[in-house]
Amino acid sequence: MTIVTRFAPSPTGNLHVGNLRTALHNWMWAVKHGGRFLLRIDDTDAERSEERFVEGIRADLDWMGLTPDGEARQSARFDLYERRFAGLVAAGRVYPAYESAQELDLKRKVLLGRGLPPIYDRAALTLTEAQVAAFEGEGRRPHWRFRLDAAPIAWDDMIRGPQRFDPATMSDPVVRRADGSWLYLLPSVIDDIDMGITHVVRGEDHVSNTAAQVQMFEALEATPPAFAHEALLTGSEGKLSKRLGSLGVAHFREAGIEPQALVSLLARIGTSDPVEPLADPTPLVAAFDFARFGRAPARFDEAELAGVNARIVHQLPFEAVRDRLPAGIDATGWDAIRPNLATVAEAADWWSVVEGPVDAQVDAEDRAYLAQAADAAAAIEWAADPWHALTGALKETTGRKGKPLFLPLRRALTGRDHGPDMAALLPLIGRERAIDRLRAAGG
Ligand code: GLU
Protein backbone atom coordinates (compact mmCIF):
# COMPACT_ATOMS: atom_id res chain seq x y z
CA MET A 1 0.00 0.00 0.00
CA THR A 2 1.35 3.43 -0.92
CA ILE A 3 1.01 5.86 1.94
CA VAL A 4 -0.71 9.08 0.92
CA THR A 5 -1.07 12.04 3.28
CA ARG A 6 -2.41 15.50 2.75
CA PHE A 7 -2.07 18.90 4.28
CA ALA A 8 -5.38 20.72 3.87
CA PRO A 9 -5.25 24.37 4.89
CA SER A 10 -8.00 26.87 4.22
CA PRO A 11 -6.44 29.87 2.47
CA THR A 12 -8.06 32.37 4.77
CA GLY A 13 -4.89 33.52 6.49
CA ASN A 14 -1.19 32.84 6.92
CA LEU A 15 -0.02 29.49 8.21
CA HIS A 16 0.99 29.62 11.84
CA VAL A 17 3.43 27.41 13.64
CA GLY A 18 0.73 24.86 14.54
CA ASN A 19 -0.20 24.50 10.85
CA LEU A 20 3.46 24.20 9.89
CA ARG A 21 3.85 21.40 12.40
CA THR A 22 0.87 19.53 10.95
CA ALA A 23 2.23 19.98 7.44
CA LEU A 24 5.65 18.74 8.54
CA HIS A 25 4.26 15.61 10.17
CA ASN A 26 2.18 14.77 7.11
CA TRP A 27 5.27 15.22 4.94
CA MET A 28 7.50 13.18 7.26
CA TRP A 29 5.08 10.29 7.41
CA ALA A 30 4.81 10.16 3.62
CA VAL A 31 8.54 10.52 3.03
CA LYS A 32 9.37 7.92 5.66
CA HIS A 33 7.22 5.37 3.82
CA GLY A 34 8.19 6.38 0.31
CA GLY A 35 4.63 7.62 -0.15
CA ARG A 36 3.02 10.80 -1.43
CA PHE A 37 2.36 14.08 0.34
CA LEU A 38 -0.40 16.20 -1.16
CA LEU A 39 -1.36 19.80 -0.67
CA ARG A 40 -5.11 20.34 -0.70
CA ILE A 41 -6.31 23.90 -0.69
CA ASP A 42 -9.64 23.98 1.17
CA ASP A 43 -11.09 26.97 -0.63
CA THR A 44 -14.79 26.13 -0.76
CA ASP A 45 -15.49 29.39 1.02
CA ALA A 46 -15.06 31.81 -1.88
CA GLU A 47 -15.62 34.85 0.26
CA ARG A 48 -12.93 34.18 2.85
CA SER A 49 -10.36 32.46 0.60
CA GLU A 50 -7.72 34.66 -0.95
CA GLU A 51 -5.19 33.96 -3.67
CA ARG A 52 -2.40 35.68 -1.77
CA PHE A 53 -2.85 33.17 1.05
CA VAL A 54 -2.68 30.26 -1.43
CA GLU A 55 0.61 31.65 -2.69
CA GLY A 56 1.79 32.18 0.86
CA ILE A 57 1.01 28.56 1.77
CA ARG A 58 3.02 27.29 -1.20
CA ALA A 59 5.93 29.58 -0.38
CA ASP A 60 5.92 28.56 3.28
CA LEU A 61 5.98 24.85 2.47
CA ASP A 62 8.75 25.48 -0.02
CA TRP A 63 10.79 27.35 2.58
CA MET A 64 10.38 24.46 5.03
CA GLY A 65 11.49 22.02 2.32
CA LEU A 66 8.12 20.24 2.29
CA THR A 67 7.58 19.79 -1.41
CA PRO A 68 4.12 18.41 -2.19
CA ASP A 69 3.83 15.58 -4.69
CA GLY A 70 0.62 17.11 -5.95
CA GLU A 71 -1.79 19.94 -5.31
CA ALA A 72 -5.57 20.07 -5.53
CA ARG A 73 -8.06 22.85 -4.93
CA GLN A 74 -11.49 22.16 -3.61
CA SER A 75 -12.97 25.02 -5.63
CA ALA A 76 -12.12 23.05 -8.80
CA ARG A 77 -13.87 19.94 -7.56
CA PHE A 78 -17.48 21.02 -7.05
CA ASP A 79 -18.76 18.66 -9.78
CA LEU A 80 -17.43 15.68 -7.87
CA TYR A 81 -19.00 16.88 -4.61
CA GLU A 82 -22.29 17.41 -6.41
CA ARG A 83 -22.30 13.84 -7.74
CA ARG A 84 -21.44 12.21 -4.46
CA PHE A 85 -23.90 14.44 -2.63
CA ALA A 86 -26.68 13.39 -5.02
CA GLY A 87 -25.86 9.74 -4.26
CA LEU A 88 -26.13 10.34 -0.51
CA VAL A 89 -29.43 12.20 -0.93
CA ALA A 90 -30.80 9.33 -3.04
CA ALA A 91 -29.68 6.87 -0.36
CA GLY A 92 -31.36 8.91 2.37
CA ARG A 93 -28.07 9.64 4.19
CA VAL A 94 -28.33 13.35 3.47
CA TYR A 95 -31.66 15.10 3.98
CA PRO A 96 -33.05 18.59 3.53
CA ALA A 97 -33.95 20.66 6.58
CA TYR A 98 -35.86 23.92 6.52
CA GLU A 99 -35.34 25.39 9.98
CA SER A 100 -34.03 28.90 10.06
CA ALA A 101 -31.05 29.77 12.21
CA GLN A 102 -33.41 31.43 14.72
CA GLU A 103 -35.61 28.35 14.92
CA LEU A 104 -32.61 26.11 15.53
CA ASP A 105 -31.35 28.48 18.16
CA LEU A 106 -34.68 28.39 19.92
CA LYS A 107 -34.73 24.58 19.88
CA ARG A 108 -31.27 24.53 21.41
CA LYS A 109 -32.29 26.94 24.14
CA VAL A 110 -35.39 24.94 25.01
CA LEU A 111 -33.33 21.75 25.36
CA LEU A 112 -30.64 23.43 27.40
CA GLY A 113 -33.35 25.00 29.58
CA ARG A 114 -34.62 21.52 30.34
CA GLY A 115 -31.13 20.37 31.17
CA LEU A 116 -30.86 18.27 28.00
CA PRO A 117 -28.00 18.16 25.49
CA PRO A 118 -28.77 20.44 22.51
CA ILE A 119 -28.99 17.68 19.92
CA TYR A 120 -30.90 18.31 16.71
CA ASP A 121 -34.29 16.57 16.94
CA ARG A 122 -34.47 15.46 13.28
CA ALA A 123 -37.80 17.17 12.83
CA ALA A 124 -36.89 17.58 9.15
CA LEU A 125 -37.14 13.81 8.69
CA THR A 126 -40.84 13.79 9.58
CA LEU A 127 -42.02 16.66 7.42
CA THR A 128 -45.04 15.84 5.25
CA GLU A 129 -45.06 16.64 1.56
CA ALA A 130 -47.53 19.41 2.27
CA GLN A 131 -45.25 21.00 4.87
CA VAL A 132 -42.29 20.87 2.48
CA ALA A 133 -44.43 22.39 -0.26
CA ALA A 134 -45.48 25.14 2.14
CA PHE A 135 -41.86 25.97 3.05
CA GLU A 136 -40.88 26.01 -0.60
CA GLY A 137 -43.90 28.19 -1.33
CA GLU A 138 -42.64 30.69 1.25
CA GLY A 139 -39.36 30.76 -0.67
CA ARG A 140 -37.41 28.81 1.95
CA ARG A 141 -34.47 26.82 0.65
CA PRO A 142 -33.29 23.82 2.65
CA HIS A 143 -29.89 23.26 4.15
CA TRP A 144 -28.67 19.66 4.22
CA ARG A 145 -27.78 17.34 7.04
CA PHE A 146 -25.95 14.05 7.12
CA ARG A 147 -28.04 11.41 8.90
CA LEU A 148 -25.86 9.66 11.45
CA ASP A 149 -26.27 5.95 11.85
CA ALA A 150 -27.02 4.67 15.37
CA ALA A 151 -24.10 2.23 15.44
CA PRO A 152 -21.26 3.36 17.73
CA ILE A 153 -18.33 5.03 16.01
CA ALA A 154 -14.86 3.77 16.78
CA TRP A 155 -11.35 4.15 15.46
CA ASP A 156 -7.89 3.47 16.75
CA ASP A 157 -6.17 6.82 16.66
CA MET A 158 -2.45 6.64 15.98
CA ILE A 159 -1.84 9.21 18.73
CA ARG A 160 -4.87 9.11 21.00
CA GLY A 161 -5.44 5.37 20.98
CA PRO A 162 -8.94 3.79 20.85
CA GLN A 163 -11.68 6.39 20.31
CA ARG A 164 -15.41 5.79 20.78
CA PHE A 165 -18.36 8.03 20.06
CA ASP A 166 -22.05 7.37 20.50
CA PRO A 167 -23.96 8.99 17.62
CA ALA A 168 -26.96 9.37 19.94
CA THR A 169 -25.02 12.17 21.61
CA MET A 170 -24.37 13.99 18.33
CA SER A 171 -26.46 16.19 16.03
CA ASP A 172 -26.72 15.21 12.40
CA PRO A 173 -24.10 17.58 10.98
CA VAL A 174 -25.03 20.20 8.40
CA VAL A 175 -23.00 19.49 5.28
CA ARG A 176 -24.38 22.09 2.88
CA ARG A 177 -25.89 25.50 3.37
CA ALA A 178 -29.16 26.74 1.93
CA ASP A 179 -27.27 28.80 -0.65
CA GLY A 180 -25.65 25.60 -1.96
CA SER A 181 -22.22 26.29 -0.47
CA TRP A 182 -20.31 23.47 1.22
CA LEU A 183 -19.23 23.12 4.79
CA TYR A 184 -15.89 21.51 5.42
CA LEU A 185 -16.97 18.01 6.53
CA LEU A 186 -18.26 16.26 3.42
CA PRO A 187 -15.99 17.62 0.65
CA SER A 188 -13.02 16.67 2.80
CA VAL A 189 -14.21 13.06 3.01
CA ILE A 190 -15.02 12.95 -0.71
CA ASP A 191 -11.52 14.20 -1.48
CA ASP A 192 -9.81 11.87 0.95
CA ILE A 193 -11.53 8.96 -0.83
CA ASP A 194 -10.91 10.28 -4.32
CA MET A 195 -7.23 11.02 -3.64
CA GLY A 196 -6.62 7.70 -1.92
CA ILE A 197 -5.55 9.32 1.35
CA THR A 198 -4.36 6.59 3.70
CA HIS A 199 -3.52 8.72 6.76
CA VAL A 200 -5.26 11.85 7.97
CA VAL A 201 -2.98 13.81 10.28
CA ARG A 202 -4.44 16.92 11.85
CA GLY A 203 -5.07 18.75 15.10
CA GLU A 204 -7.11 17.26 17.92
CA ASP A 205 -9.64 20.07 17.41
CA HIS A 206 -10.92 17.83 14.60
CA VAL A 207 -11.62 14.76 16.73
CA SER A 208 -15.39 15.28 16.85
CA ASN A 209 -15.44 16.03 13.11
CA THR A 210 -13.71 12.71 12.60
CA ALA A 211 -16.48 10.91 14.44
CA ALA A 212 -19.01 12.19 11.90
CA GLN A 213 -16.62 11.75 9.00
CA VAL A 214 -16.00 8.09 9.80
CA GLN A 215 -19.68 7.47 9.04
CA MET A 216 -19.43 9.57 5.88
CA PHE A 217 -16.60 7.37 4.59
CA GLU A 218 -18.77 4.35 5.25
CA ALA A 219 -21.84 5.95 3.65
CA LEU A 220 -19.70 6.60 0.56
CA GLU A 221 -18.63 2.95 0.62
CA ALA A 222 -15.04 3.64 1.50
CA THR A 223 -12.88 2.36 4.32
CA PRO A 224 -11.92 5.29 6.55
CA PRO A 225 -8.22 6.16 6.50
CA ALA A 226 -6.04 5.93 9.58
CA PHE A 227 -6.22 9.02 11.80
CA ALA A 228 -3.63 10.80 13.91
CA HIS A 229 -4.96 13.70 15.95
CA GLU A 230 -2.19 15.79 17.37
CA ALA A 231 -2.28 17.57 20.70
CA LEU A 232 -2.21 21.28 20.11
CA LEU A 233 0.77 23.51 20.69
CA THR A 234 1.08 25.60 23.75
CA GLY A 235 3.31 28.62 24.31
CA SER A 236 6.19 28.61 26.72
CA GLU A 237 4.21 30.35 29.44
CA GLY A 238 1.20 28.14 28.93
CA LYS A 239 -0.36 30.96 26.96
CA LEU A 240 -1.93 29.41 23.94
CA SER A 241 -3.32 30.67 20.72
CA LYS A 242 -2.80 34.41 20.53
CA ARG A 243 0.95 34.65 20.21
CA LEU A 244 1.37 31.27 18.50
CA GLY A 245 -1.29 32.23 15.99
CA SER A 246 0.85 35.13 14.85
CA LEU A 247 4.04 33.11 14.52
CA GLY A 248 4.49 32.12 10.92
CA VAL A 249 7.28 31.79 8.39
CA ALA A 250 7.53 35.57 7.92
CA HIS A 251 8.26 36.02 11.61
CA PHE A 252 10.78 33.17 11.73
CA ARG A 253 12.65 34.40 8.66
CA GLU A 254 12.86 37.86 10.12
CA ALA A 255 14.26 36.41 13.32
CA GLY A 256 16.97 34.63 11.33
CA ILE A 257 15.55 31.18 11.93
CA GLU A 258 16.69 28.53 9.47
CA PRO A 259 14.04 26.15 8.13
CA GLN A 260 16.07 23.21 9.41
CA ALA A 261 15.83 24.59 12.95
CA LEU A 262 12.07 24.80 12.75
CA VAL A 263 11.92 21.32 11.23
CA SER A 264 14.19 19.87 13.93
CA LEU A 265 12.12 21.39 16.71
CA LEU A 266 8.65 20.69 15.29
CA ALA A 267 9.61 17.10 14.49
CA ARG A 268 10.16 16.38 18.17
CA ILE A 269 8.20 18.63 20.51
CA GLY A 270 5.27 16.72 21.92
CA THR A 271 7.27 13.47 21.84
CA SER A 272 9.38 11.93 24.56
CA ASP A 273 12.46 12.16 22.30
CA PRO A 274 15.03 14.93 22.63
CA VAL A 275 15.22 17.69 20.03
CA GLU A 276 18.18 17.08 17.73
CA PRO A 277 19.36 20.02 15.63
CA LEU A 278 19.98 18.41 12.25
CA ALA A 279 20.70 20.34 9.07
CA ASP A 280 19.70 17.25 7.10
CA PRO A 281 16.32 15.91 8.33
CA THR A 282 16.83 12.38 7.00
CA PRO A 283 17.43 10.80 10.45
CA LEU A 284 14.45 12.70 11.87
CA VAL A 285 12.25 11.31 9.10
CA ALA A 286 13.56 7.79 9.64
CA ALA A 287 12.78 7.94 13.38
CA PHE A 288 9.41 9.68 12.99
CA ASP A 289 6.52 7.77 14.54
CA PHE A 290 3.11 8.91 15.78
CA ALA A 291 3.44 6.43 18.63
CA ARG A 292 6.12 8.72 20.10
CA PHE A 293 3.63 11.57 20.54
CA GLY A 294 1.72 12.10 23.74
CA ARG A 295 -1.70 13.55 24.38
CA ALA A 296 -0.44 16.49 26.43
CA PRO A 297 -0.06 19.79 24.60
CA ALA A 298 3.35 20.23 22.99
CA ARG A 299 5.29 23.17 24.33
CA PHE A 300 6.66 25.55 21.71
CA ASP A 301 9.35 27.81 23.09
CA GLU A 302 10.94 30.49 20.92
CA ALA A 303 14.03 30.55 23.12
CA GLU A 304 14.47 26.82 22.49
CA LEU A 305 14.04 27.45 18.77
CA ALA A 306 16.75 30.13 18.87
CA GLY A 307 19.08 27.66 20.58
CA VAL A 308 18.36 24.96 18.00
CA ASN A 309 18.87 27.55 15.29
CA ALA A 310 22.34 28.47 16.52
CA ARG A 311 23.32 24.81 16.48
CA ILE A 312 22.00 24.49 12.92
CA VAL A 313 23.93 27.59 11.80
CA HIS A 314 27.10 26.04 13.23
CA GLN A 315 26.61 23.08 10.89
CA LEU A 316 25.80 24.91 7.67
CA PRO A 317 28.46 24.61 5.01
CA PHE A 318 29.66 27.70 3.15
CA GLU A 319 27.82 26.65 -0.02
CA ALA A 320 24.52 26.65 1.85
CA VAL A 321 24.88 30.25 2.98
CA ARG A 322 27.17 31.98 0.47
CA ASP A 323 24.29 33.84 -1.21
CA ARG A 324 23.36 35.39 2.10
CA LEU A 325 26.87 36.45 3.12
CA PRO A 326 28.47 39.81 2.43
CA ALA A 327 31.01 39.87 -0.40
CA GLY A 328 34.46 39.02 0.87
CA ILE A 329 33.67 36.19 3.25
CA ASP A 330 35.12 33.03 1.82
CA ALA A 331 34.84 29.47 3.09
CA THR A 332 37.70 30.01 5.55
CA GLY A 333 36.15 33.18 6.91
CA TRP A 334 32.78 31.47 7.23
CA ASP A 335 34.25 28.49 9.07
CA ALA A 336 35.97 30.84 11.51
CA ILE A 337 32.89 32.96 12.19
CA ARG A 338 30.27 30.21 12.11
CA PRO A 339 30.75 28.82 15.64
CA ASN A 340 30.00 32.24 17.10
CA LEU A 341 26.76 32.96 15.27
CA ALA A 342 23.18 32.64 16.44
CA THR A 343 21.92 33.57 12.96
CA VAL A 344 23.48 33.71 9.50
CA ALA A 345 22.68 37.43 9.31
CA GLU A 346 25.07 38.09 12.18
CA ALA A 347 27.93 37.12 9.88
CA ALA A 348 27.59 40.48 8.13
CA ASP A 349 28.08 42.24 11.41
CA TRP A 350 31.19 40.24 12.16
CA TRP A 351 32.53 40.84 8.73
CA SER A 352 32.10 44.59 8.83
CA VAL A 353 34.14 44.58 12.01
CA VAL A 354 36.79 42.31 10.49
CA GLU A 355 37.18 44.26 7.30
CA GLY A 356 36.70 47.70 8.77
CA PRO A 357 37.17 50.52 8.53
CA VAL A 358 36.36 50.97 12.19
CA ASP A 359 35.67 54.33 13.72
CA ALA A 360 37.15 53.99 17.18
CA GLN A 361 36.23 56.46 19.90
CA VAL A 362 38.72 55.92 22.70
CA ASP A 363 39.17 57.80 25.96
CA ALA A 364 42.16 60.14 26.07
CA GLU A 365 43.55 58.41 29.13
CA ASP A 366 43.68 55.10 27.26
CA ARG A 367 45.88 56.41 24.42
CA ALA A 368 49.20 55.51 25.99
CA TYR A 369 47.85 52.06 26.89
CA LEU A 370 46.74 51.49 23.31
CA ALA A 371 50.10 52.63 21.91
CA GLN A 372 51.65 50.05 24.20
CA ALA A 373 49.13 47.51 22.93
CA ALA A 374 50.20 48.22 19.35
CA ASP A 375 53.79 47.38 20.26
CA ALA A 376 52.68 44.27 22.10
CA ALA A 377 50.60 43.18 19.11
CA ALA A 378 53.68 43.46 16.91
CA ALA A 379 55.66 41.31 19.31
CA ILE A 380 53.29 38.43 20.07
CA GLU A 381 52.93 35.08 18.33
CA TRP A 382 49.88 35.30 16.01
CA ALA A 383 49.55 31.72 14.90
CA ALA A 384 47.76 30.28 17.91
CA ASP A 385 45.61 32.49 20.11
CA PRO A 386 46.62 36.13 19.61
CA TRP A 387 43.89 37.57 21.84
CA HIS A 388 45.08 35.70 24.89
CA ALA A 389 48.69 36.32 24.00
CA LEU A 390 48.03 40.06 23.66
CA THR A 391 45.92 40.52 26.78
CA GLY A 392 48.26 38.27 28.76
CA ALA A 393 51.26 40.38 27.78
CA LEU A 394 49.46 43.64 28.53
CA LYS A 395 48.20 42.44 31.85
CA GLU A 396 51.76 41.76 32.88
CA THR A 397 53.30 44.98 31.63
CA THR A 398 50.52 47.40 32.60
CA GLY A 399 48.98 45.74 35.64
CA ARG A 400 45.53 46.35 34.13
CA LYS A 401 42.87 43.69 34.47
CA GLY A 402 39.17 43.22 33.78
CA LYS A 403 37.33 45.97 31.97
CA PRO A 404 40.19 48.51 31.84
CA LEU A 405 42.32 45.83 30.22
CA PHE A 406 39.77 44.58 27.66
CA LEU A 407 37.39 47.41 26.79
CA PRO A 408 39.88 49.90 25.31
CA LEU A 409 41.23 47.09 23.11
CA ARG A 410 37.79 46.13 21.93
CA ARG A 411 36.95 49.75 21.14
CA ALA A 412 40.18 50.31 19.25
CA LEU A 413 39.96 47.06 17.32
CA THR A 414 36.25 47.01 16.52
CA GLY A 415 34.95 50.54 17.03
CA ARG A 416 32.34 49.19 19.44
CA ASP A 417 31.78 48.44 23.08
CA HIS A 418 30.07 45.13 22.41
CA GLY A 419 30.25 42.42 19.83
CA PRO A 420 31.61 39.08 18.92
CA ASP A 421 34.04 37.20 21.09
CA MET A 422 37.41 38.92 20.63
CA ALA A 423 39.32 35.65 20.80
CA ALA A 424 37.48 34.49 17.69
CA LEU A 425 37.51 37.87 16.02
CA LEU A 426 41.13 38.90 16.36
CA PRO A 427 42.62 36.16 14.15
CA LEU A 428 40.21 37.25 11.41
CA ILE A 429 41.13 40.91 11.77
CA GLY A 430 44.70 39.71 11.47
CA ARG A 431 48.04 41.10 12.51
CA GLU A 432 48.40 44.03 10.10
CA ARG A 433 44.94 45.49 10.56
CA ALA A 434 45.09 44.98 14.32
CA ILE A 435 48.40 46.79 14.68
CA ASP A 436 47.16 49.64 12.45
CA ARG A 437 43.96 50.05 14.47
CA LEU A 438 45.77 50.00 17.80
CA ARG A 439 48.34 52.52 16.56
CA ALA A 440 45.63 54.82 15.21
CA ALA A 441 43.84 54.71 18.55
CA GLY A 442 47.03 55.16 20.52
CA GLY A 443 48.33 58.11 18.48
N1 GLU B 1 -9.30 22.82 6.09
C1 GLU B 1 -9.34 22.10 7.32
C2 GLU B 1 -8.61 22.89 8.38
O1 GLU B 1 -7.79 23.72 8.03
C3 GLU B 1 -8.72 20.76 7.08
C4 GLU B 1 -8.72 19.84 8.22
C5 GLU B 1 -8.29 18.45 7.76
O2 GLU B 1 -7.07 18.22 7.72
O3 GLU B 1 -9.14 17.63 7.41
O4 GLU B 1 -8.86 22.74 9.54
Image (cartoon, rainbow, N blue to C red):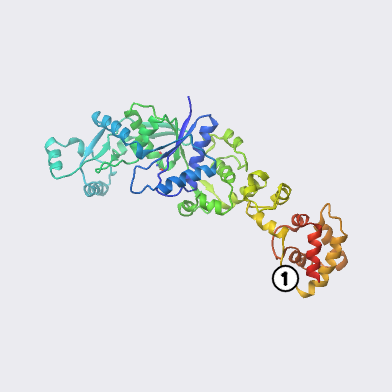
Residue 149 seen: no
Is residue 177 left or right of 60 when viewed as pictured?
left
Residue 207 point in image, percent of width and height? 40, 39
SS for callout 1? loop
Residue 382 point in image, percent of width and height? 84, 55
157 or 363, nearer to the observer: 363
Residue 353 point in image, percent of width and height? 71, 60
Is residue 265 left or right of 372 when viewed as pictured?
left
Near mark 1 (Cα within 10 A), the count class, few <14, some 14-19 or many ≥20, is few
Q: Amino acid at mark 1?
A: Gln
Outermost residue on the top side: it is 1
Q: Quadrant of ligand 1?
A: top left
The residue under the point 75% across, 71% down is 362
The residue under the point 36% across, 27% down is 222
**Residue under numbered circle 1:** 361
169 or 60, nearer to the observer: 60
Residue 230 point in image, percent of width and height? 47, 40
Quadrant for the C terminus in the image: bottom right
Q: Is residue 430 above or below residue 90?
A: below
